[in-house]
Each structure stands twice: as C-alpha cells, then as structure tokens.
Image (cartoon, rainbow, N blue to C red):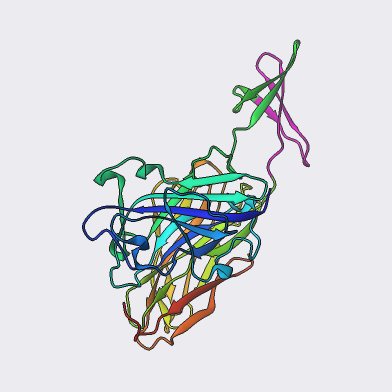
Amino acid sequence: MADITQIRVTVHTADAEYAGTADWVYLGLAGREFALNSGADEDLATGAKVCFVLGEDNTDEADIKIKPVLDPERNDPRLPQLDTSDLDRYPAYIRCTQSGSRPEWCLELVHVEARTASGEHHTFGNPRLDGLGEKRRIWMDVPFGERLYLTRVDGQAHLGQPTAPTTQTQTGQGTQTHPGTSTGTQSQPQTGGGTHSATTGNGQQTQTPPARTQGKLKVEQLGSAEAKPGGKDQVINIQLTGDPFGQPVTPGSVEHTFTAPAGFTWTGDVAYAYYNSDMQALGSQDWVKGQVSANGRTLTFTRDPHMFTDASDSGALTYTLIARPQPDAPVGRHTDGKAQIGTAKPAKITATVLDPAEDD
C-alpha cells in the first residue's frame, strides 16, 4: 500500500464526424471522481490527443499535450490522500455528462496511470478499445450510455478476487494440497472455527479450511447525477459490497428504502446486477419494481442482497435507479437523499440541479 501522488489520464477522441464534445468528462478512480477539464475547447475536439494531470505536477512526456486540470487543488488524489489499496476497492470508469453544446463524444482510447512517490505505476484501460477502426470506438451520451468502465492492464493483482478452496489430504507420504473441493467424502461436522475433517472412501483423512466469516453490508453511491429542472431522467447507481470485500453477505430478505435528493422523484424502476472487481457483470441484469410514495421521493422494496454465496453473486451488487428532475427543482447540489438497506449504515444520495439559464 502506497500513497497516490499523481494520476495521468490520456484520452484520444476519434477522428470522425461529430466525435468531439464540449461536455464535462470525469474519471472515477479509487473511490472518487475527478473532472477532466483544462478549460481549453480543443481538449476533446475531433481527433484530439491529450493527457490530463491530477496531483503532483512533473510533466515530462513530449509526445502528447500535457494539461493540468482546472481547480487542481480540488482534483488532487492527495486531498484527501488516496492510496493504492483504494484502486481495487472501487470501480474505475470514464463518465461523460450531457452538459455542453456538443453532448455526444466518440472515445477511441483511454489510458489511466496512478503513480506513487516510490515509483509504482498502476495502469487502467479498456481492452475493447485496443486497436483502430470504427469497431474499436465507443460513442458516449445519454441515449447510448455515459460511462465506460476500466480494468487493470498492468498485471497487478485485484483485491477481493475469490480463489478456489484447497483440500489437504493426509496420506502415508505426507500432506498433499489439491485445488478445488474433494469428492466422495463423508463430512464430519465440527462446531467453532476450527478446521473441518473428512474421510474418503479409501480411508484417507482430509482437512478443509473453516467456513468464511460473515461480512458486514456496506452501501455507497457511485458517482452523482445532475440535470436542469424538468430535464432528462438521471441514472443513480447504489453499490453494495461486503466489508471486508469478498466475505459472504447473507442478511436475508430486508427492506430497501431509497430517498431521492430534493428536486428529484423516482420512476420506480430498479435494475440490479453483480460485478466482479474488473466491473464485468456476472450474468444479466434483473429488475425489481419498487413502491413509490405519493410525493415520489421514497422508493421501497424487499429482497435478499446476498453476495459471495456462489459463483453467480461473487462480486459487488449494484442497484440502478432512475431519478426524474422536477420542473420546480431548486437549483444547487442536494445531499439529502439516502439509501437505507436493512440495518446497514445508510449511504447519502446526492444530485445537482443545474441553473436553467446556463447554456447547454
């Protein structure tokens, strides 16, 4: 674990008609977002190649435009201090918002590098964008998705990756360790946290690790949302993980209550899916129809938010809710939303209502 002192974000906008954007673009990394905006109109113009620098300023590459961002002291991985353990604790992504006169953006390459004072480089990208051509680009905007998730491309191990259990077999030649689970055994149940033993059909003694302890449920919002009064519906993602990550979570059927921030109401539609540490979905999305209160700000439903009980749920659980900005929504950033799931510590839900007089 080491402190992150600098983050470099290299992006190439495709050289195609209408590929450039005037939107705000954000990097999500290590549990927070950073705005990628130097104040120059050409940063994300058609065919542009630029490297944004966050944190320590020691730009040294000469083959690409190096750009410090606006408000550098508020887009700094040292304030608060992030460290490398945060890199695999939270998803990494690029997000494009609909806030400018040219909303859509065609991204051809993204390369993120988190650096430490000791010289470590932790690199993220998306392998689906490797190479050139129309099939190696992604268009980003509200109608076709605002977020591109990133994965490690540096070979570093990911925290919380589930591993196959091992079985130790006692034989006349000593102890042998085998990956996976054994077959043809008669289990001898034990109480407490000790090692479990079993006897195979040929009289061999086996030992398996004790059952994993139960993790605590942790709830948090991924990113934020912003819209003008009466504008387009916004996606709000609420992520659930076990604390520590990777431990099984089986709270049973519990009530989920989501309170929308001021100025927003819920549509009632909720999608959910499980994602591994590379933010790859484990199977397809499922849907829940929540009950919405009369004023539209409270959404409730009941289900079991289980995690790490088998291969199908061995990842973070993310709920995707749709928030609708109201015509009379008060302008400003609102932090009075809340996600309450069972007895877990509630998470704050935030959203911003933009000034309707601002240019799109």
Residue sitting farthest toward the top:
173
Q: Residue 256: where, in percent of width, then height?
A: 52, 67
Q: Residue 25: where, in percent of width, then height?
A: 41, 64
Residue sitting farthest toward the left:
17
Q: Residue 349: where, in percent of width, then height?
A: 52, 72
Q: Taking the image as drawn, is residue 91 in sight?
A: no
Q: Is residue 28 left or right of residue 204?
A: left
From the viewer's side, name the closer residue of 2 and 144: 2
Q: Is residue 264 left or right of residue 314?
A: left
Q: Quadrant of residue 46?
A: bottom left
Q: Quadrant of residue 58?
A: bottom right
Q: Residue at x 76, y 36 (%)?
A: 190
Residue 227 vertical position relative to residue 17 in the rendered view, above or below: below
From the viewer's side, name the closer residue of 56 and 23: 56
Q: Taking the image as drawn, is residue 176 in sight?
A: yes
In the image, residue 209 lies in the stretch drawn in magenta: yes
* Residues drawn in magenta: 186-212
From the viewer's side, name the closer residue of 144 and 270: 144
Q: Residue at x 41, y 86 (%)?
A: 329
Residue 93 vertical position relative to residue 223 in the rendered view, above or below: above
